[in-house]
Image (spheres, grey):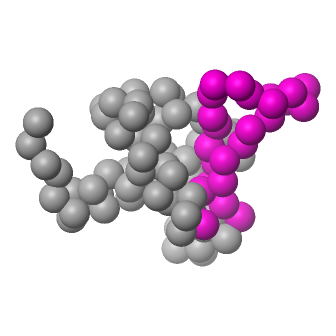
């Protein structure tokens, strides 16, 4: 499998952030994000964890009833990233 260059990885991360902004305030599962950006789930999860380290996305570990997910993860844009995106949209 060919290695993906860093500029292309950055573009994919931008696509993820944009998709989370558009779907905000709804949080999305990793599989939903992966299908939207046409990448496999493991690669998408790696990028999401990288974005989490940079405080650009937040991981949602509980369902609407308050139970923790055992194997799934949902993601949303962090509050600070949402404010920055929203400011640039206007």
Q: Quadrant of residue 66?
A: top right
Residue 27 in sight here? yes
In the picture shown, does residue 22 fall above or below 51? above
Q: Is residue 55 left or right of residue 79?
A: left
In the picture shown, does residue 17 fall above or below 46? below
In the image shown, does 10 or 2 lie closer to the viewer? 2
In the image shown, does 83 or 66 lie closer to the viewer? 66
Residue 7 horizontal/vertical position (percent): 21, 64
Q: Is residue 69 magenta?
A: yes
Residue at left 53%, top 68%? 54
Residue at left 35%, top 40%? 43
What is the chief secondary structure element of the magenta stretch? Answer: loop
Residue at left 50%, top 28%? 32
Residue 47 horizontal/vertical position (percent): 41, 50
Residue at left 16%, top 58%? 5
Q: Is residue 14 left or right of residue 89?
A: left
In the image shown, does 24 or 66 lie closer to the viewer? 66
Residue 59 horizontal/vertical position (percent): 66, 47
């Amino acid at each position: 499998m060919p290695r993906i260059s860093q500029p292309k990885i950055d573009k994919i991360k931008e696509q993820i952030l944009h998709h989370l902004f558009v779907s905000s305030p709804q949080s999305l599962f990793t599989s939903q994000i992966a299908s939207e950006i046409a990448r496999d789930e493991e690669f998408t999860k790696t990028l999401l964890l990288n974005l989490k380290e940079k405080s650009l996305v937040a991981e949602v570990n509980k369902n609407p009833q308050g139970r923790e997910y055992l194997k799934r993860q949902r993601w949303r844009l962090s509050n600070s990233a949402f404010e920055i995106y929203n400011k640039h949209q206007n």
